[in-house]
Each structure stands twice: as structure tokens, then as C-alpha cells.
Image (cartoon, rainbow, N blue to C red):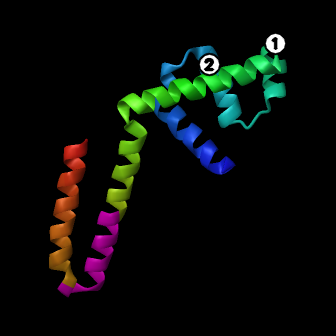
Amino acid sequence: MKMEKIYKQTMLFDFYGELLTEHQRSIYEDVVYNDMSLGEIAEEQGISRQGVHDLVKRCDRILQEYENKLHLVEKFAKAKETVGRIEQLTVDSEADEVRAKGNLAQIRKLSRELLTEL
């Protein structure tokens, strides 16, 4: 569960981190990317551990609100999955020429879906 939370925080930060203030970005980056404890960050920043905790929670909420409105992480994940499916169809087509024609039609369909979602 912790890895899922870290992955989610990382993705949200990658997409929306620039929309945070410099102070928020710095502290959130230390928590998510640098795996620093709240105590370490508090000492480094000259604020309380509770202050760091509150700021991280606020950033989590802000980043999630951006995702709820813009859905960029969701769209990215779906596009990545579609590209993976296209890749597998090309591999399958190279291995079996009989299925290649049917796979080509699927590749075209997936490509069109991907383009309309972007």
C-alpha cells in the first residue's frame, strides 16, 4: 500500500508539482523523492514536524484536486496502456503473419482512440 501511495504522489507531483509554491514544492519533493523524514525536513526548514506534516497533507489535497479537474495522470496511464497493447500487437504480428492483418486493424483502431483522447 505504501508503494502505491508513493507512486501516486510521484505521478501527481510530476504532472502538477510546478503549480505548487516553491516552498511547497521543496518540502514535498524532500518527502516524495528524497525520502526524508518529517523530522529531518522540519529541522532543515526551521519549522515544526507538525507544520511539515500539515503542508504535505495540504499538497496531497491540492495535487489531487488538480487531477480531479484535469485528469492528466489518468489520461497518461490510459495512453501508456494503449501503447503497450499496440506494441504487443506488433510483436504478435511479426511472429505470426496470418494474424498480422487482423492485428493491423486493431492497431489502427487503438491509434485512432489514442489520438482522439489527446
Q: Position of residue 29 (x, y in %)?
A: 64, 29
Q: Is 90 drawn above or below residue 4 in the view shown?
A: below
Please report the residue visible at 66 percent of the width from the left and 51 percent of the height from the top. 1
Which three-letter amino acid code belongs to the residue tagged 2? Gln
> Which quadrant of the rendered structure holds the C terminus?
top left
From mark 2 to mark 1, how far is it between C-alphas?
Answer: 14 Å
Q: Residues within 10 Å of mark 1 (few under 14, many from 20)?
A: few
Q: Earlier in the sequence, mark 2 or mark 1?
A: 2
Q: Position of residue 93 (x, y in %)?
A: 25, 78
For residue 86: magenta?
yes
**Residue 73 or residue 14, whichever sits in front:** 73
Tell whether 36 sits left or right of 4.
Answer: right
Quarter of the view holding residue 8: top right
Please report the residue visible at 21 percent of the width from the left and 47 percent of the height from the top. 115
Prevailing secondary structure class for the magenta stretch in the rendered image = helix
Q: Position of residue 114 (x, y in %)?
A: 24, 51
Quarter of the view holding residue 72: top left
Please report the residue visible at 68 percent of the width from the left and 47 percent of the height from the top. 2
SS at badge 2: helix
Q: Position of residue 26 (x, y in %)?
A: 65, 22
**Over which residues does the magenta segment extend?**
85-98
* Cβ atoms at labels 2 and 1 below 8 Å apart: no
Kindly identify which numbered label has been placed on residue 24.
Answer: 2
Quarter of the view holding residue 84: bottom left
Kindly identify which numbered label has been placed on residue 81.
Answer: none
Q: Which residue is mark 1?
A: 46
SS at badge 1: loop
